[in-house]
Image (cartoon, rainbow, N blue to C red):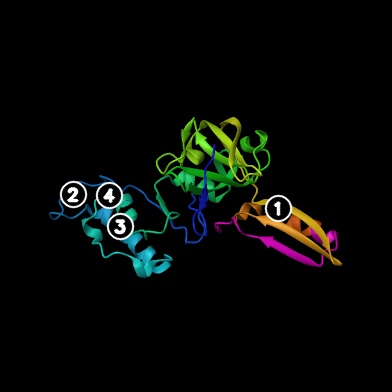
Amino acid sequence: MKHYLKLYNNNYFAMKDLKRLSLLLLIVLGIFIGCSKDDVPENEAPALTQKVNLFMKDAMENFYLWNYKLPNIDYRSESNSLEYFDKLLYKDDKWSIATDDVEGLSNSIEGIETSYGWSLVFGKFTDSEDRFALVEFVYPFTPASEAGISRGDFIVLINGNPITVDNYKELYDSQSAQFSMATIGEDGDLHLSGNVDLVARELALNPVAKTSVVEHDGHKIGYMLYNQFIDSYNFAIDTALENMISNNITDLVIDLRYNPGGH
């Protein structure tokens, strides 16, 4: 299986995760589609939908990374708030989302999600429109870790099908699937290494994903991989720091590369 790989500049598009390089704007929508049949002027959306649209518009004008690129769209005439949000997004933004899943968003903020327990970035093969996923890291005690998947592994097929812009979300949203794994050989080619069948489950993901102490040139360097700001896991930060202090560290590295933000 010979392909050339291309990672997107900076160099990926990503879901969840996702989430880096731009302000991740999570807007909790209430009732907004077909929410009112009040009499409204022709070509105008119902009043409640307009309120949701205006909330989106105001939030993006104030906080969006590309707020100076927002298109001039009359929010009053947009009858579908999710479609209106998509129209506002800058062309290079593949991270920002709007959701009406209040429970799912609330759980995510608390580190609870139904998933396979991995963080992925995506790239494109240069000789086709197919995509691939590269595993950034895997949380311990999750379906992905139990299947032996680890950082640096490639995923190239979902249920035997190539990964495309139409199905890549199944790597996050599906309840179960078969994934074809691959590795880069010494020849630089991509080689299939086998299939894994995963079933997603509800996980409580500790954002302090890894800690260690490294000794180098007379320094004892503490390291902490911290993947999301979650209030209910502040104790985990305290524990990690206390352990490193007890090891007499002289330096500290806090790794926020995969941290989308949070509280």
Give the foreground label among 3 and 2: 3
User: What residue is shown with label 3?
Assistant: 53
Q: Which residues are magenta?
A: 244-263
Disc 4/disc 1 C-alpha distance (Å): 42 Å
Whichever of callouts 4 and 1 sits on the residue coming sooner in the sequence is 4
Q: Is residue 200 visible?
A: no
At horizontal 67% and vertical 36% (from top left) the residue drawn is 148
Disc 4/disc 3 C-alpha distance (Å): 9 Å
At horizontal 47% and vertical 48% (from top left) the residue drawn is 126
- Looking at the picture, how far across and down is residue 143, in whole percent? 62, 35
User: What residue is shown with label 1?
Assistant: 236
**Seen from this angle, which residue lies furthest front?**
187
Check the picture and name the quadrant holding the C terminus.
bottom right
**Seen from this angle, which residue lies furthest bottom?**
68
Of residue 243 and residue 39, the one placed in the foreground of this image is 243
Res. 2 mark? none
User: What residue is shown with label 4?
Assistant: 80
Judge the density around disc 4: few (<14), some (14-19), many (≥20) Cα neighbours within 10 Å.
some
Give the foreground label among 1 and 2: 1
Tell me whether the residue at label 3 lies in contact with that at label 2, contact meaning CB atoms closer than 8 angstroms: no
User: What residue is shown with label 2?
Assistant: 38
In the image, what residue type sits under mark 3? Asn
Disc 3/disc 2 C-alpha distance (Å): 17 Å
Q: Secondary structure at mark 3?
A: helix
Judge the density around disc 3: few (<14), some (14-19), many (≥20) Cα neighbours within 10 Å.
many
Whichever of callouts 3 and 2 sits on the residue coming sooner in the sequence is 2
In the image, what residue type sits under mark 2? Asp
